[in-house]
Image (spheres, helix red, strand yellow):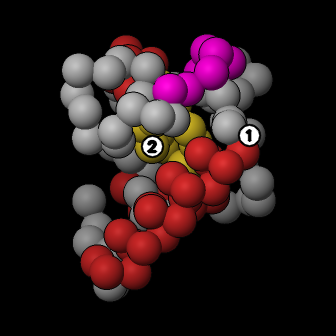
Amino acid sequence: MPRPPDTTRFNRQRKAWRNQQTQADAPCWLCGQPIDYQADYNDYTKPDRLSLDHIATASANPELFYDPANWAPAHWICNAKRSNKKPPAGLGNRSRKW
Protein backbone atom coordinates (compact mmCIF):
# COMPACT_ATOMS: atom_id res chain seq x y z
CA MET A 1 0.00 0.00 0.00
CA PRO A 2 1.49 3.38 -0.91
CA ARG A 3 2.50 5.65 1.91
CA PRO A 4 0.89 9.09 2.02
CA PRO A 5 3.21 11.86 0.94
CA ASP A 6 2.60 13.55 4.29
CA THR A 7 1.35 11.48 7.23
CA THR A 8 0.42 14.60 9.21
CA ARG A 9 -1.70 15.80 6.30
CA PHE A 10 -3.38 12.38 6.01
CA ASN A 11 -4.17 12.35 9.75
CA ARG A 12 -5.68 15.84 9.47
CA GLN A 13 -7.79 14.75 6.48
CA ARG A 14 -9.01 11.66 8.31
CA LYS A 15 -9.88 13.67 11.43
CA ALA A 16 -11.73 16.27 9.32
CA TRP A 17 -13.59 13.44 7.56
CA ARG A 18 -14.66 11.95 10.92
CA ASN A 19 -15.88 15.36 12.10
CA GLN A 20 -17.76 15.88 8.83
CA GLN A 21 -19.51 12.50 9.12
CA THR A 22 -20.39 13.18 12.75
CA GLN A 23 -21.87 16.60 11.94
CA ALA A 24 -23.90 15.10 9.09
CA ASP A 25 -25.00 12.19 11.30
CA ALA A 26 -24.41 10.06 8.22
CA PRO A 27 -25.76 6.50 8.34
CA CYS A 28 -23.71 3.42 7.61
CA TRP A 29 -23.31 3.25 3.85
CA LEU A 30 -23.47 -0.55 3.95
CA CYS A 31 -26.62 -1.18 6.02
CA GLY A 32 -28.25 2.27 6.13
CA GLN A 33 -28.64 2.22 9.94
CA PRO A 34 -27.50 5.04 12.28
CA ILE A 35 -23.91 5.06 13.49
CA ASP A 36 -23.05 5.57 17.17
CA TYR A 37 -21.03 8.77 16.81
CA GLN A 38 -20.77 9.09 20.60
CA ALA A 39 -18.66 5.92 20.77
CA ASP A 40 -14.93 6.51 20.73
CA TYR A 41 -13.45 5.89 17.28
CA ASN A 42 -10.86 3.55 18.85
CA ASP A 43 -13.19 1.65 21.23
CA TYR A 44 -13.13 -1.84 19.77
CA THR A 45 -15.93 -3.02 22.10
CA LYS A 46 -18.48 -0.85 20.23
CA PRO A 47 -19.47 -2.59 16.95
CA ASP A 48 -21.75 0.31 15.90
CA ARG A 49 -19.04 2.98 16.13
CA LEU A 50 -17.83 4.92 13.09
CA SER A 51 -15.35 3.19 10.84
CA LEU A 52 -13.74 4.57 7.71
CA ASP A 53 -14.58 2.17 4.90
CA HIS A 54 -13.01 2.24 1.45
CA ILE A 55 -15.64 2.15 -1.29
CA ALA A 56 -13.19 0.65 -3.76
CA THR A 57 -11.43 -1.89 -1.57
CA ALA A 58 -7.95 -0.97 -0.42
CA SER A 59 -6.62 -4.43 -1.30
CA ALA A 60 -7.77 -4.17 -4.93
CA ASN A 61 -7.20 -0.41 -5.30
CA PRO A 62 -4.23 0.61 -3.13
CA GLU A 63 -3.80 3.81 -5.14
CA LEU A 64 -7.16 5.01 -3.72
CA PHE A 65 -6.37 4.25 -0.08
CA TYR A 66 -5.63 7.88 0.86
CA ASP A 67 -8.27 9.46 -1.40
CA PRO A 68 -11.15 10.96 0.67
CA ALA A 69 -13.45 10.51 -2.34
CA ASN A 70 -13.06 6.76 -1.73
CA TRP A 71 -14.01 6.91 1.97
CA ALA A 72 -17.49 6.14 3.31
CA PRO A 73 -18.90 5.98 6.85
CA ALA A 74 -19.67 2.49 8.10
CA HIS A 75 -20.26 0.65 11.33
CA TRP A 76 -17.11 -1.08 12.44
CA ILE A 77 -18.94 -4.43 12.34
CA CYS A 78 -20.32 -3.83 8.82
CA ASN A 79 -16.86 -2.84 7.62
CA ALA A 80 -15.33 -5.94 9.22
CA LYS A 81 -17.98 -8.24 7.70
CA ARG A 82 -17.50 -6.72 4.26
CA SER A 83 -13.73 -7.09 4.56
CA ASN A 84 -12.23 -6.82 1.07
CA LYS A 85 -15.38 -7.83 -0.82
CA LYS A 86 -16.97 -5.65 -3.44
CA PRO A 87 -19.61 -3.18 -2.19
CA PRO A 88 -23.25 -4.26 -2.37
CA ALA A 89 -24.96 -3.61 -5.70
CA GLY A 90 -25.98 0.02 -6.13
CA LEU A 91 -23.61 1.32 -3.48
CA GLY A 92 -20.28 2.97 -3.84
CA ASN A 93 -20.67 4.84 -7.06
CA ARG A 94 -17.56 6.88 -7.59
CA SER A 95 -17.87 10.65 -7.58
CA ARG A 96 -15.70 10.95 -10.68
CA LYS A 97 -14.20 8.75 -13.40
CA TRP A 98 -10.82 7.31 -12.45
Q: Quadrant of the image for the N terminus?
A: bottom left
Q: Regarding mark 2 in the picture, which secondary structure is present there?
A: strand
Q: Is residue 71 magenta?
A: no
Give the mark nearest the N terminus, 1 or 2.
2
Residue 2: give x, y in percent of width and height.
28, 68
Query: For numbered disc 1, what is the local secondary structure?
Result: loop
In the rendered structure, find residue 17 and report the number of the disc placed on it: none
Camera-nearest residue between 16 and 78: 16
* Residue behind mark 1: 93
| Magenta-drawn segment | 30-36
In the rendered image of this protein, does residue 44 appear above or below residue 55?
A: above
Is the residue marked by circle 2 packed among few (<14), some (14-19), or many (20+) residues within 10 Å?
A: some
Residue extending farthest bottom: 6
Image side of residue 7 versus residue 72, left or right: left
Instruction: Indicate which label's residue lies in the foreground, 1 or 2.
Output: 2
At horizontal 45% and vertical 43% (from top left) the residue drawn is 52
Residue at (29%, 78%) from the top-left corner? 7
The residue nearer to you, when weighing 60 against 95, is 95
User: Residue 44, image x and y in percent?
Assistant: 22, 28
Q: Is residue 88 visible?
A: no
* Relative to 59, 33 lies left or right: right
> Amino acid type of disc 1?
Asn
Q: Is residue 34 magenta?
A: yes
Q: Tell me the kind of residue under disc 2.
A: Leu
Residue 38 percent location from the top left of the image? 46, 34
Vertical placement of residue 53 versus 77, above or below: below
Question: In the image, is residue 6 above or below residue 64?
Answer: below
Label 2 belongs to which residue? Answer: 52
- Residue displayed at 55% across by 56% down: 19
